[in-house]
Image (tube, grey):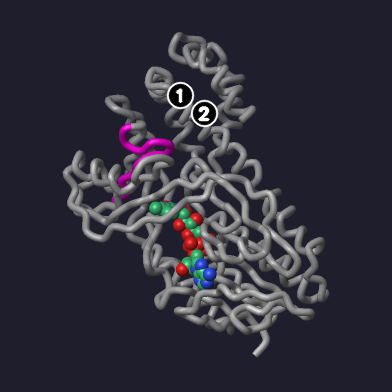
Amino acid sequence: MNYDVAIAGCGPSGAFCAKLLAEKGFKVVVFEEHEKIGLPKHCSGLIHPRIEDITDISFEEAIENEIRGAHILFRDEELFLHAESCKSLVLERSVVDKIIAEEAEAAGAHIRLGEKANRFERKNDGISVNGITCRVLIGADGIRSEVANSFGLKEKGEIIRGMQCNARYKPGEKENVEVYFGRDVAPGFFAWVIPVAEDRCRIGLGVNEGSASAYLKKLLKKLDAEPDEIFGGGIPIGLRRKSYADRVMLVGDSAMQVKPISGGGVNISLKCAKICAEVASKALEKDAMDEKSLSEYQKLWRKEFEREIRFGIIARRLIYSLNENELRRIFNAPDEELLNKISMYGDIDYPSRIAEPLIADVLAEPQRYINSRYLSLATLMPQVIRAILG
Ligand SMILES: Cc1cc2nc3c(=O)[nH]c(=O)nc-3n(C[C@H](O)[C@H](O)[C@H](O)COP(=O)(O)OP(=O)(O)OC[C@H]3O[C@@H](n4cnc5c(N)ncnc54)[C@H](O)[C@@H]3O)c2cc1C
């Protein structure tokens, strides 16, 4: 049987693309290498509530907790951010994936579980995937994308190795996440404690050197937390140069559609999946699936996210280039008023949006910032310039 669209991978981006394209009346097949949707787990499920607006799907069934603030720690320094409203949901990711996949099936997509898409062949009228011909192939197959590798779209980016567990651990506050910085805790990234219930948390970290599981073991010992399920995965960091080829599109982690500061990729993947389905649908209708027609996809998703990804790459470079004293200065600078502003405007999906209200604040009340704590940050200017130049 031939299909209009074949999708490799039934994570959130693949399943959502499948749903949108099947709703438009296209014949869609999705290959998922695992027997069960959403398993094995590899995500903390900390996701901004706008996931429901992006998808127009209710995730009520997957909600475990609501987060309003963060307790950020670096050795003995700490910062508290707290908002009145819910800043993030804690969702059970396997349930999120299942809900989206069920929507895709209900719309008419055919999901082939337990089948890895790995035999690709270009034909005159399309691409053969494991012997099934499609007019367009979408690679939603995650960080080690077979589709990217098979169609000349392999690109090198930084990969953060993530490892986490569900653990018996009483959080400080059920509505606050804890974030730990420091080379001894999580080199090149950070560690997190996400409350799921009164006495349960997801505890994890990312590293760019050393063994993630050894660092996790150390953190669990320090927190005196008792782990049960341990799971992990890679987080791709970078801005992809090319996410399309003749009849081929990449979406989600395979296209590095991930926020470099937090490593979060679910909402951005879903938004890009919407753009991907829109461009694929127009191309299929016009029967124009050539590279030039599909390049529109990259133009559109970059228009939405390039600024955030570039901002995140620079911010990461800056944070992880600072030495202990410089990091301490950053922790000591903000006063309560500034922290309240950050809490109010901070958005895990769009971290750069904090910049505008903060700059406006400095311009409106420059005298408030002319004190030794803020002025000490001026000495970090060379590092900032280095981070911007790359
Ligand atoms: C430790 C960790 C914690 C994270 N925490 C968060 C978080 O709190 N919030 C957040 O927003 N993001 C988080 N992320 C990132 C998030 O998990 C990803 O960005 C997101 O899952 C991307 O979705 P996707 O659909 O592109 O890929 P995936 O979710 O990776 O789905 C890819 C699917 O494709 C399947 N597959 C792969 N290859 C093939 C093939 N050849 N054929 C068939 N099937 C294939 C896989 O089995 C999988 O089901 C975290 C990541 C890690 C590693």
Residue ranking furthest to the bottom: 1
Residue 193 on the magenta span: yes
Of residue 181 and residue 82, the one placed in the foreground of this image is: 181
Q: Position of residue 88 (x, y in %)?
A: 42, 50
359 left or right, relative to 82: right
Q: Identity of the amino acid at label 1?
A: Leu
Quadrant of the image containing the C terminus: top right
Q: Identity of the amino acid at label 2?
A: Leu
215 left or right, relative to 127: left
State the residue at coordinates (54%, 21%).
383
Dot 2: within a 10 Å radius of its alpha carbon, few (fewer than 14), some, or many (20 or more) residues?
some
| Secondary element at image label 1 | loop
Q: Position of residue 108 (x, y in %)?
A: 58, 84
Q: CA distance from mark 1 to mark 2?
A: 7 Å
Quadrant of the image containing the N terminus: bottom right
- Labels 1 and 2 touching (C-beta < 8 A): yes
Span colored in magenta? 184-195
Count of numbered badges drawn on the protein = 2
State the residue at coordinates (41%, 55%).
233
Dot 1: within a 10 Å radius of its alpha carbon, few (fewer than 14), some, or many (20 or more) residues?
some
Residue under numbered circle 1: 322
Residue 367 on the magenta span: no
Residue under numbered circle 2: 318
Quarter location, residue 28:
bottom right
Of residue 313 and residue 241, the one placed in the foreground of this image is: 241
